[in-house]
Image (cartoon, rainbow, N blue to C red):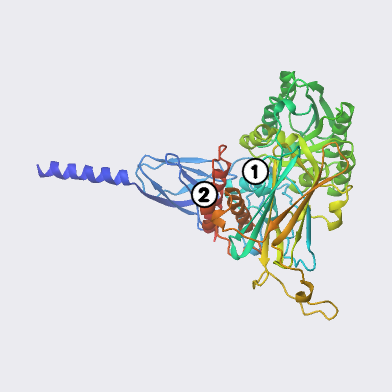
Amino acid sequence: MRAILFFMSLLVSLGGYAQQGYEVSGTVTDKNSKIVLVGVQVTNQETKESKLTDKNGQYQIRIVDGKNTLVFSYVGYLNQCVVVNNRSHIDVALVQQNIRLDEEILMKYNSSRKNVLVGRAYGTKPMSGQVESYQKIKENKFIDPIQEPLSTFSADVDAASYSNVRRFINSGNLPDKDAVRIEEMINYFQYQIAAPKSGEPVNIVTELTKAPWNTNHELMRVTLKARDLPSGQLKASNLVFLIDVSGSMMGPGRLPLVKSSLKMLIDQLRDVDRVAIVTYAGAASVKLESTSGKDKMKIKSAIDELEAGGSTAGAAGIKRAYEIANRHFIKDGNNRVILASDGDFNVGESSDESMEELIRKESKSGISLTVLGYGMGNLKDSKMEVLANKGHGNYAYIDNISEARKALVTEFGGTLFTVAKDVKIQVEFNPSYVQAYRLVGYENRLLEAEDFNNDKEMGGDMGVGHTVTALYEIVPVGIASDMVGTVDALKYQQQRKNQVNMKKNGELATVKFRYKEPEGQKSRLQQQVVAAKPIALNNVSEDLRFASSVAELGLLLRNSDFKQKSDFDQLIARAKASKGADEEGYRAEFIRLAENARDLIKAMY
């Protein structure tokens, strides 16, 4: 009897233990070299909880059942699934994938982060030149409005940086700091802004609050909202797909994803729309002459037949695409070349400067350029960005089919149909209230003050329903701040107190923006005054609180000189509180991304 009672007691105990769960720990190594692997993602397949291995390759994760399955995933390695089988310690040796080097991200070392892993490269043979390239970013500094009262930049709606940063973090790596363009991260998300009224194509909204990473400073938001149009009112399209089919586009995440993406776009086309397909590898060729959007199966069949191989004659392909676009030009229509590539141009005109000049020349014909970036390991982000900027178009990085759906289906109008072109923003700061200001991001979009009124100077384009948001960090007058540099008193200039002699009229700044109608040549001006009355962060719009969270993550990922008291937990909590309706789940995805970035950095230090 005692034995039966003991056995029943043991069963109850074990049952409670299993129900409560326990921790499983272990070390993850490379099977061949036995080297520990940092940043391996360990996921409980049943609970969906994920952890990353630390700097010693070690992990610890909770399970609720001894039969749970753990999945170990790491870029460059085969995924490995392990059934726990009531064990509390499980060591795993991952096997490298037998793939080409250019399918993986290369190892880089950042002097400020010492030997922090920002990518892994594995393969049987090193291949010269296979490295991702990003345009160097020199961060905007704080500026004294006495010296420079005007801040001028080209409005832009590119969002490529966010999806590229996501790709890095989801593969267990930190992004190259120059891959983090904060304005593009902010503009990845849609914001709830009222549509413009009185027939105007663009509406402007401003807000002022305290900067979350330094509450002695202020944060000013400037957001432009382009008008929405029903699909029936969208102009007829003359599209030319320019598809890179060179050898660098082999493999998953490249040409196969390009095919799937463009077929999704084909489904959005109407009978009045036309599509041609140009491909380039060692040379450029026409795969499909301009075809009506009603012949969807014919267009899709041509896309299905594409195969990758050869070198990359990008310049020849671009020239041929513009020739076809000009041949079938639709007056007052949407004439556009859509380039799908990793940007690795290595035959012909391959320098950024020559490609920039080629695109700038062709953009004057009324044909815009949309750039879709694919691939990893040799992504030439710097070239893709240049082409889009000079081609009166936009740039998106597509790392999975969900991102393709976002760019080419959910935001179809905003990606392909321009409602305002050459959009420029200029802010004049009042030195009676502003000691110094800093534009957060937009380093590659800055303009000279006189460019604002010069209609020959190109600005950014805004598509149907798109929003453009910019943030300024402001040091109010009278605040002592380490962010503001000092110089010796000048002998030949008036001192600040003598220069700031205007009355305090309650105006912190005046925001102006210029734009042209899609077919127009003369710009129109709108402006709005920002009152010098900051609102508590908890009382401003969900949009501003969320945008500030995205900006704060960008500051941390860049290890910015201006990050100040930026904090992962702080920005994550604010993002959760301002997530809003989030019907597509993009904001929830951002929160998970920020959490993963936080845990990844903790594991690496």
Pinpoint residue 276: horizontal percent, then vertical percent.
80, 26
Pinpoint residue 313: horizontal percent, then vertical percent.
83, 38
Which quadrant, please, contains the N terminus? top left
Inspect this view and state whether residue 397 appears: yes
Q: CA distance from mark 1 to mark 2?
A: 20 Å
Question: Total marks drawn?
Answer: 2
Q: Looking at the image, which residue sits at the far left?
A: 1
- The answer to whether 39 is drawn above or below residue 419 in the figure is below
Inspect this view and state whether residue 180 appears: no
Kind of element beneath mark 2: helix
Mark 1 and mark 2 lie on one chain; the one further toward the N terminus is 1
Q: Nearer the viewer, residue 251 or 210?
A: 210
**Mark 1 Cα-neighbour bin, 10 Å: few <14, some 14–19, many ≥20:** some
Q: Nearer the viewer, residue 439 or 254?
A: 439
Residue type indicated by callout 2: Lys
Marks 1, 2: nearer the viewer: 1
Q: Nearer the viewer, residue 272 or 97?
A: 272
Left or right of 226 on screen, residue 334 = right
Kind of element beneath mark 1: loop
Q: Name which quarter of the figure residue 261 lies in.
A: top right
For disc 2, the marked residue is 576
Q: Name which quarter of the figure residue 245 lies in.
A: top right
Left or right of 586 on screen, residue 280 = right
Which quadrant, please, contains the C terminus? bottom right
Q: Who's the residue at 37% across and 39% down the image?
A: 67
Left or right of 15 on screen, residue 231 = right
Answer whether labels 1 and 2 touch (C-beta < 8 Å). no
For disc 1, the marked residue is 193
